[in-house]
Structures are given as structure tokens and as C-alpha cells.
Amino acid sequence: MESSSVLFGGIIMADKYRIGEVAKLLGVTTSAIRFYEKMGMVKPEKNVENGYRYYRGKDVKKLRSILCHRSMEMSLSVIDHLKHSHDLSEVKSMIEEQRTNSLRKIAEEEKMIRLYDFYCAIIDEVVDHSNRFTVKHHECLHLFASDFYYRPNSTVCIVGHPITTFYSDGSLEEHLMVCDRFINMLDCEEAAEEVSSLELSSSLYTVVRREGDIDERSVLQSAFDDAVAQGYRIRPPYYVYYLISLGEWETPCRFYGVILSLDDTKEI
């Protein structure tokens, strides 16, 4: 390194640097610097006598600028365009486009966080309500056509539960149900296809665990018998919806939410 130097951001800079010295100064790898050199974004001098490449102070400053822009997740093509543009309005337009892209990514990340909240809520529901009854006084369930479950990229499928409604005459209906607290996660067009909503003013709720094949009738019968044995007076319609599975695909352990409409309540 040559002895003469200048100040750069409070750091004493030499006139020439070897690649390892630049890497240490900027906190990057030598391979990263070689990559930027290969892309033509920085052009060090080559000593014809020993074959060493030397980076001037201007090269270090340019690399520092590249790294700053990369920390903003700008592509090399965008950075290169910015560095060669002489039009302020064009530069601003490119920055605004990058900002818009960042806002889109933030929205996607926020949606992903909501999905994690959804899964955590299911697990909490299973833990809190397995093998016990809870009287619920206010709850809204949104019903959609069951074929949403098989539609590609359906947001209804992602936060929906297959639900079966059992009526007094023995008939049943199948839908895909979305809880009220997650309805805002649906695409607007899909949300508009809601079939109906259930306003459950007074109902009995529990979570039933089942091993093996799906059998919603047996799930309902189990919850019904337990409720009657505990003195609850219940009436149709009844609702059984799938929550989550554990274990192997061939022999899973499934958890179902069961909602029983109440005629009267018993203190728990």
C-alpha cells in the first residue's frame, strides 16, 4: 500500500489498495469484488511488472456506493443504470419504482405473517378446546362453495376449513368455511363469492380428535353423546369442520371443531 493518503468518510485512505485490503476495508469478500470487476462496474489498474491489480480510492468509493445500493436490494442492472444516468427525473423514477417494489414485498410478507397467525390460531384452538365444551355467544362463520378447496391459488382454500352441516332430517351440506377474523385475507373477488354466513348466537363448541379415516358423522356423534351426558340441551343444525392433522399421511391423527346449537345452557 502506498504511503500517501486521503480522508474518506473519516477513514484514512491510501492511493492504492490490493484486493484483500479493499475487502477488509469494506467488509466484503474478495470474490464479491472480483464479481463486480467481472461485471465491469469497477476497473482496477494492473501492474505489468508483478501482475497485481490495484484499486484506487475512486474504485473503493464506487464499490462502497454499489454495496449501499445493493443493501437496498437493487439489482446490478438498476445500479449500473443509475450510475450512468444524467437525468434527475429518470433517477427519481427508478427510485420510486424500487420503492413500489419494496411496498409490494412488505405486503406479501405481512400476508405471510397473517398465515402464520392462522396456523398458530388453529393449534391454540386444538389445545384450548380438546375434550372440553365451551359456550360461545357470538361468532360469525363465512361459507363458500366446497370446490374452492381444489381451485389453484385459492385464498379461500388457504385459510378455509372444510365444514359439514347436519340437519334434523339427516341431510347434510358441505362448504369451505372461513372464520370472521381471517375473512380479510381473501382476495376481493373470491370474498364476493361467499354463499352465506352463520351468525352463531349461542352454541356449544369442542374439539374432537380422530385417528385414521375421515368420518364426520362419527365425530358429531361422539361430541353429541358427550354433550348430552353432561346435561346440555342441543338442537340441529350441527357443524363439524376440519382443523389440522398430525402424523403420517396413511394413518393421520385429525382434529375437528364441532359446533352444537343450544336450546339451553348448563353452567360449566
Image: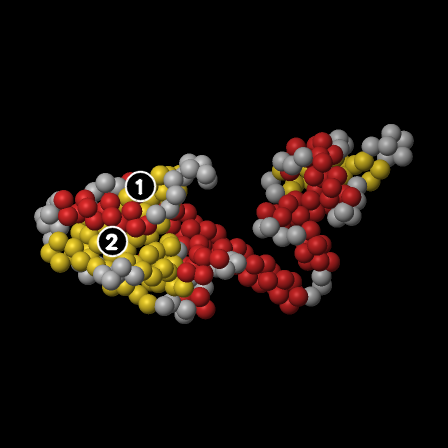
Secondary structure state at the residue bearing disc 2: strand
Mark 2 or mark 1: whose residue is earlier in sequence: 1
77 horizontally vs 139: left or right: right
Identify the colour scheme used: secondary structure
Between residue 256 and residue 267, name the one nearer to us.
256
In the rendered image, which quarter contains the C terminus?
A: top left
Between residue 6 and residue 251, name the one nearer to us.
251
Secondary structure state at the residue bearing disc 1: strand
Res 171 → quadrant: bottom left
98 horizontally vs 41: left or right: left
Q: Residue at x 41, y 52 (%)?
A: 114
Q: Is residue 75 visible?
A: yes
Q: Residue at x 42, y 37 (%)?
A: 251
Between residue 81 and residue 124, name the one nearer to us.
124
Compared with 63, 173 (above or below) is below
Between residue 108 and residue 81, name the one nearer to us.
108
Dot 2 amino acid type? Ile
Residue 233 position in % (x across, y down): 13, 53
Q: Residue furthest right?
A: 49
Q: Residue at x 38, y 67 (%)?
A: 194
Res 187 → quadrant: bottom left
Residue 184 position in % (x across, y down): 38, 61
Residue at label 1? Answer: 209
Compared with 44, 198 (above or below) is below
Instruction: Identify the disc placed on residue 259.
Output: 2
Residue 79 position in % (x across, y down): 68, 54
